Image (cartoon, rainbow, N blue to C red):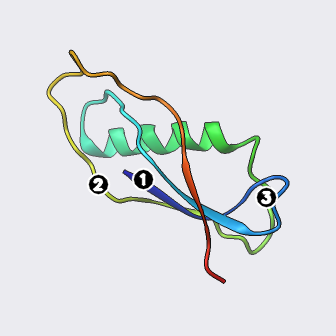
């Protein structure tokens, strides 16, 4: 699971955070983390306002290694958004 904080979305006046999951197939934990974060960056790039001082961050909350994706319905997108406390 990945958590994002301090993201300012287009059309919003307040910073938000999110939780999301991504399933990636890579060799090694570090490569999988990099791939998952890059996927999220690409998905957010047209919806996030780049504002000086906003300092958006993403954190890896949990990693679960699967032996196979066989018989697993793998989601590929989606975010659960929440307002940041001021």
Which percent across, then down, holds residue 81? 58, 56
Q: Give the alpha-carbon distance from disc 3 to disc 1, as whole Å.
A: 20 Å
Category of crowding for the residue at label 3, using alpha-carbon neighbours closer than 10 angstroms: few (below 14), some (14–19), many (at least 20): some
**Residue lying at 74% horizontally and 51% vertically, measured from the top left:** 48
| Relative to 59, 29 lies left or right | left
* Number of numbered callouts drawn: 3
Which percent across, then down, holds residue 37? 48, 45
Which is more N-terminal, label 1 or label 3? 1
Q: Give the alpha-carbon distance from disc 2 to disc 3, as whole Å.
A: 27 Å
The answer to whether residue 4 is above or below residue 24 is below
- Residue 62: mark in rendering: 2
Q: Looking at this rendering, what residue extends furthest in the bottom direction? A: 86
- The residue that label 3 is drawn on is 50
Which percent across, then down, holds residue 35? 43, 37
- Residue 19: mark in rendering: none
Q: In which quarter of the image is residue 62?
A: bottom left
Give the structural element (helix, strand or loop) at label 2: loop
Quadrant for the C terminus in the image:
bottom right
**Residue lying at 65% horizontally and 64% vertically, measured from the top left:** 16
**Residue lying at 83% horizontally and 67% vertically, measured from the top left:** 13
Which of discs 3 and 1 lies nearer the camera? The answer is: 1
Considering depth in this image, is 23 or 78 the residue closer to the camera?
A: 78
- The residue that label 1 is drawn on is 2
Which of discs 2 and 3 lies nearer the camera? The answer is: 2
């Amino acid at each position: 699971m990945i958590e994002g904080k301090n993201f300012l979305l287009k059309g919003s006046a307040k910073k938000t955070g999110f939780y999301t999951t991504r399933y990636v197939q890579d060799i090694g934990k570090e490569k999988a983390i990099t791939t998952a974060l890059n996927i999220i960056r690409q998905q957010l790039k047209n919806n996030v306002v780049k504002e000086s001082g906003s300092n958006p961050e993403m954190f890896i909350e949990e990693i679960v290694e699967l032996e196979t994706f066989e018989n697993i319905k793998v989601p590929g997108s989606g975010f659960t958004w929440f307002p940041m406390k001021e």
